[in-house]
Image (spheres, rainbow, N blue to C red):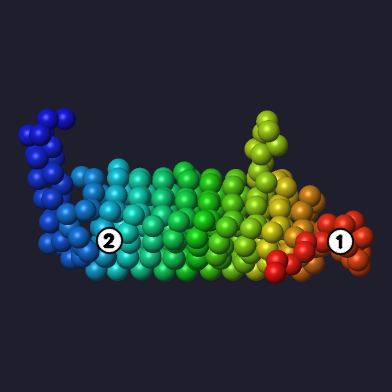
């Protein structure tokens, strides 16, 4: 790209941004927002610095698309807040909060009033209204119902090295921290999976599933092995 071509592209980009601003969109820094020609943005929405909106993306009204977010070919409904996240070929329902540092890969559908928190990745999955995954969770090839809570470190184990499989989590289920759902499995409505469990079979609704070895304490083991660390003077 020549300098003249660069200047022309920058002029066109600024014109696009000004066009959105005239329709009621607020820019934190109009010079650092990168918005494609086909993008639609509703009035009352705030666009932060270093935001990139690409392809056939539609942003609803009164949204907050904050710093360092990239959205491509996706639908974002009204009153959504997205912080420093990437959303590709997916949809986010009204009133949902995404990020910071979340990643929604193609064909992900998040419902209304959800929480997709920091370092949560969703791929080819549905996530029902009111459900929450607040941090450090992978949801792949799965269907999660409404009002589900996924604890920190939950992983949907969808790939066996050859094939990928889907899992289903029913409405109101609670999946404890550091649990693995080895697909394909179904967790029924209102079921609880205890923290640290690896789920390899279906869990009926209203059931508690526990899959972990019982803890064992061996008093004095460290000193008996001669590996006790001496305190520094």
The residue that appears at 20% across and 60% down in the rendered structure is 29
Where's the C terminus, which quadrant?
A: bottom right
Q: In this rendered view, identify the residue nearer to me: 163 or 213.
A: 213
- Residue 212 lies in what quarter of the image? bottom right
Q: From the viewer's perspective, is residue 116 above or below residue 122?
A: below
Local packing at callout 1 (Cα closer than 10 Å; few below 14, some 14-19, many 20+) is few
Residue at mark 2 to residue at mark 1: CA–CA distance: 53 Å
Q: Secondary structure at mark 1?
A: helix
> Residue 216: image x %, image y %?
90, 63
Q: Secondary structure at mark 2?
A: loop
Closer to the eye: label 2 or 1? 1
Q: Is residue 171 visible?
A: no
Local packing at callout 2 (Cα closer than 10 Å; few below 14, some 14-19, many 20+) is many
Q: From the viewer's perspective, is residue 71 above or below residue 27?
A: above
Left or right side of 178 for 130: left
Residue 62 - label: none
The residue that appears at 53% across and 51% down in the rendered structure is 122
For disc 2, the marked residue is: 48
- Residue 150 lies in what quarter of the image? bottom right
For disc 1, the marked residue is: 222
Left or right side of 103 for 73: left
> Residue 106: image x %, image y %?
47, 44
The residue that appears at 35% across and 50% down in the rendered structure is 70
């Amino acid at each position: 790209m020549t300098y003249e071509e660069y200047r022309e592209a920058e002029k066109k980009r600024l014109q696009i941004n000004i066009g959105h601003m005239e329709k009621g969109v607020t820019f934190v820094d109009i010079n650092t927002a990168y918005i494609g020609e086909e993008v639609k943005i509703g009035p009352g929405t705030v666009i932060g610095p270093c935001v990139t909106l690409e392809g056939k993306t539609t942003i609803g009204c009164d949204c907050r698309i904050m710093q360092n977010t990239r959205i491509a070919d996706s639908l974002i409904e009204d009153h959504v807040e997205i912080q420093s996240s990437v959303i590709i070929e997916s949809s986010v329902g009204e009133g949902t909060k995404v990020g910071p540092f979340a990643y929604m890969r193609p064909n992900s559908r998040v419902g209304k009033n959800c929480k997709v928190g920091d370092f949560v990745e969703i791929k080819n999955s549905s996530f029902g209204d009111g459900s929450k995954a607040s941090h450090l969770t992978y949801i792949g090839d799965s269907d999660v119902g409404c009002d589900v809570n996924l604890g920190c470190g939950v992983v949907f184990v969808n790939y066996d090295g050859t094939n990928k499989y889907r899992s289903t989590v029913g409405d109101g289920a609670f999946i404890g921290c550091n649990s693995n759902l080895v697909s394909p499995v179904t967790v029924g409505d209102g079921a609880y999976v205890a923290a640290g469990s690896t789920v390899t079979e279906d869990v009926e609704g209203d059931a508690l599933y526990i899959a972990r070895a019982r803890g064992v304490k061996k008093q004095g083991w460290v000193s008996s092995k001669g590996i006790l660390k001496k305190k520094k003077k």
